[in-house]
Image (cartoon, rainbow, N blue to C red):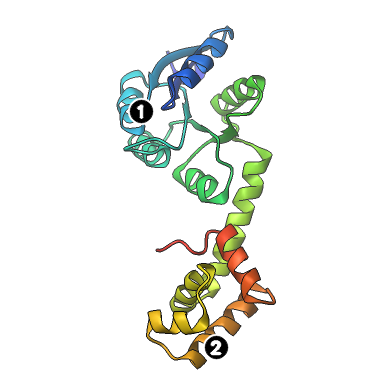
Amino acid sequence: MERDRQSTIRVLIVDDHQVVRRGLRAYLSLESDIEVVGEAQDGESAIAEFARVRPDVTLLDLHMVPVDGVEALQRIRRNDERARVIVLTSFIDAAHVLPAMEAGAAGYLLKTSDPNEIVAAIRGVFAGRATFDAEAMQAMAKGMRARATMSLLTERELDVLRLLARGKSNQEIGDELFIGLKTVKTHVSNILAKLEVTDRTQAAVYALTHGLTQEA
């Protein structure tokens, strides 16, 4: 039977906490049009289980070891571009939302979501409609703006910003990067202008909250 003609939505649950998997399975079992066809406790087993059961929709946690949710999502969709995956996680910051969306997530929900929202998301994604939590969309927009800002900074300015965000003084930044104090001050001035902030404290806060301090 073709996938789009199925009356039952076949779901794979991926989470490293057994209590979460059991809870989701128990709730979803109450829905006449949803069948849980498999479970996995980490990204590696998720990839294997997906290949085995070929679910219509996968509920995927992000924080798992040794293979996390984003890598699992990338590999699943590399093997099957039709895969419909809803990220179900506790993290709503841009550092988690953006990679998941870029990896091909069809939905992004928090584990605190009402169970009815999760069921509605499964049905929506199965029908071809993307479903993203409002906070996830805000985080994505924030992350996109931060990336745009980061693209304005030179590699050296990023180096200075990372050290500035760690509380380093201009002299300490200069010593670590082997550049003169005057050069450091010029970089700091350029950073403040590009980030549109008035002082180094605001620049540090901006960098930390937007993930600009992460090494490439």
User: How many discs appear?
Assistant: 2
- Residue 73, located in which quarter of the rendered image? top left
Q: Is residue 27 visible?
A: yes
Q: Which label belongs to residue 18?
A: none
Where the C terminus falls, by quadrant?
bottom left
In the rendered view, would you say 156 is above or below 213?
A: below
Q: Residue at x 65, y 69 (%)?
A: 202
Q: Position of residue 116 (x, y in %)?
A: 66, 19
Label 2 sits on a secondary structure element that is helix
Q: Which residue is mark 2?
A: 186
- Residue 46, located in which quarter of the rendered image? top left
Label 1 sits on a secondary structure element that is helix
Left/right of residue 1 with respect to residue 89 in the rendered view: left
Circle nearer the N terminus (1, 2): 1
- Residue 64, located in which quarter of the rendered image? top left
Q: Position of residue 93 (x, y in %)?
A: 58, 47
Amino acid type at image mark 2 = Thr
In the rendered view, would you say 201 is above or below 5?
A: below
Q: Which residue is mark 1?
A: 46
Q: Residue at x 44, y 17 (%)?
A: 2
Q: Is residue 7 visible?
A: no
Where the N terminus falls, by quadrant?
top left
Asked if labels 2 and 1 touch by Cβ distance under 8 angstroms, the answer is no
Q: Residue at x 67, y 74 (%)?
A: 196
Along the line of sight, the residue nearer the viewer: 34 or 4 = 34
